[in-house]
Image: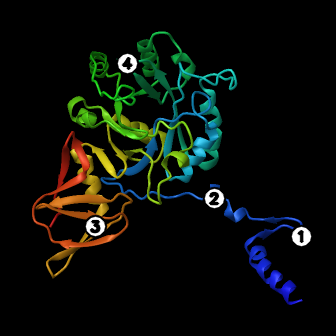
């Protein structure tokens, strides 16, 4: 009898934790994490919201291994605000199994995005060898029309549709971030708008200067083919590559306007790359200062990005979501995880 009572007591927590349907089935729907979203806190500035975006995504409709609606679910759960579906035009190894046109992955994903109120951008990847390389065309209306022999014609067609062109992974596959004459021609003609300074697990340090030199927007994107959790699951604060977009409003139109104005920063592995103006404004918006009579100050980092600063040879770290007690600095600090160019870090001053 005592043994039966003990077993009953052991089973009570299980029954209490379950959503009881009947004596045959106990449901544990509250354990389903698909309805839980992680929030990424990055403040805006000057009336702009900071939107977290990934403009390079693949599915089973090209060479990815994930169905399109799962891409939306992943991004929503991980705290992103928008993604672009950019399956390859020319490279579709699953085409004999997944039979569809170039718009279908977007069409499937759009239904999931609409259910979640999530921003989804139609795109495609023009996939050619170097020197041209791979280019994403986003904000297009019909990916099928990009399936032409001449890649330069495909770029023109994308532009006619209102497309925004991103130069993907400039250092892949030969480990050389070569700026070819064709890219110079396309940029001067207004046919390349942005470039990836981070892609998947790579960065391209020589490209950190390209925003200042050529006026094209820096981006960080996953170029994800497998599952995001499988590739980027590394502790609680491991964030996938993302492009920070400073938009007037959280909408498709708001993102489009911000991209055209080049209001972006690239973010991955705790490092930011982009213009001195936007880096300085983001750091200022993230760090809230309270000066103390002791000659020190409290610096509260309200963002999920930690900042590392050097002052007079000493390193100071401002952890994400925490307050640090530091000296009341005079003069500039070097923010060593914010890059304004190749081997060039942001110089920042706390306002008095």
Quarter occupied by residue 212: top left
Disc 4, SS: loop
Which of pointers 4 and 1 lies earlier in the amino acid sequence? 1
Q: Is residue 245 above or below residue 212?
A: below
Q: Which residue is mark 2?
A: 33
The coloring applied to the image is rainbow
Q: Which residue is mark 1?
A: 23
The answer for how far apart the CA atoms under marks 3 and 4 are is 46 Å
Residue 130 is marked as 4
Disc 2, SS: helix
The answer for how far apart the CA atoms under marks 2 and 4 are is 42 Å
Residue 95 % position (x, y): 65, 22
Which of pointers 3 and 1 lies earlier in the amino acid sequence? 1
- Count of numbered badges drawn on the protein: 4
Q: Which residue is mark 3?
A: 288
Please tell me how crowded label 1 is: few (under 14), some (14-19), or many (20+) other residues with Cα within 10 Å.
few
Quarter occupied by residue 198: top left
Question: In the displayed image of the protein, which residue is found farthest to the top?
Answer: 149
């Amino acid at each position: 009898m005592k043994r039966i009572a003990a077993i009953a007591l052991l089973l009570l927590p299980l029954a209490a934790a379950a959503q009881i349907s009947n004596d045959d089935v106990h449901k544990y729907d509250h354990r389903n994490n698909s309805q839980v979203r992680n929030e990424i806190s990055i403040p805006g500035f000057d009336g702009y919201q900071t939107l977290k975006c990934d403009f390079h995504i693949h599915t089973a409709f090209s060479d990815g291994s994930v169905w399109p609606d799962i891409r939306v679910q992943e991004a929503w759960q991980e705290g992103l605000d928008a993604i672009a579906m950019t399956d390859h035009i020319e490279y579709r190894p699953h085409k004999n199994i997944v039979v569809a046109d170039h718009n279908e992955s977007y069409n499937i994903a759009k239904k999931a995005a609409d259910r979640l109120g999530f921003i989804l951008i139609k795109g495609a990847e023009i996939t050619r060898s170097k020197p041209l390389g791979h280019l994403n065309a986003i904000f297009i209306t019909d990916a099928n029309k990009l399936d032409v022999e001449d890649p330069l014609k495909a770029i023109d067609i994308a532009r006619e549709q209102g497309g925004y062109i991103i130069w993907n992974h400039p250092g892949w596959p030969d480990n050389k971030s070569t700026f070819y004459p064709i890219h110079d021609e396309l940029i001067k003609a207004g046919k390349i708008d942005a470039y990836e300074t981070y892609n998947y697990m790579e960065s391209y340090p020589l490209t950190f200067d390209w925003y200042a030199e050529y006026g094209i927007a820096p981006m960080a994107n996953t170029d994800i083919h497998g599952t995001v959790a499988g590739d980027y699951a590394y502790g609680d604060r491991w964030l996938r590559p993302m492009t920070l977009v400073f938009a007037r409003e959280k909408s498709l139109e708001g993102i489009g306007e911000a991209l055209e104005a080049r209001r972006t920063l690239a973010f991955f592995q705790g490092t930011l790359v982009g213009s001195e103006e936007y880096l300085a404004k983001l750091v200022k918006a993230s760090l809230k200062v309270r000066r103390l009579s002791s000659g020190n100050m409290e610096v509260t980092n309200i963002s999920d990005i930690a900042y590392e600063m050097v002052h007079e040879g000493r390193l100071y770290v401002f952890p994400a979501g925490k307050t640090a007690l530091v000296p009341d600095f005079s003069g500039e600090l070097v923010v060593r995880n914010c890059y304004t160019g190749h081997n060039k870090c942001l110089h920042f001053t706390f306002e008095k």
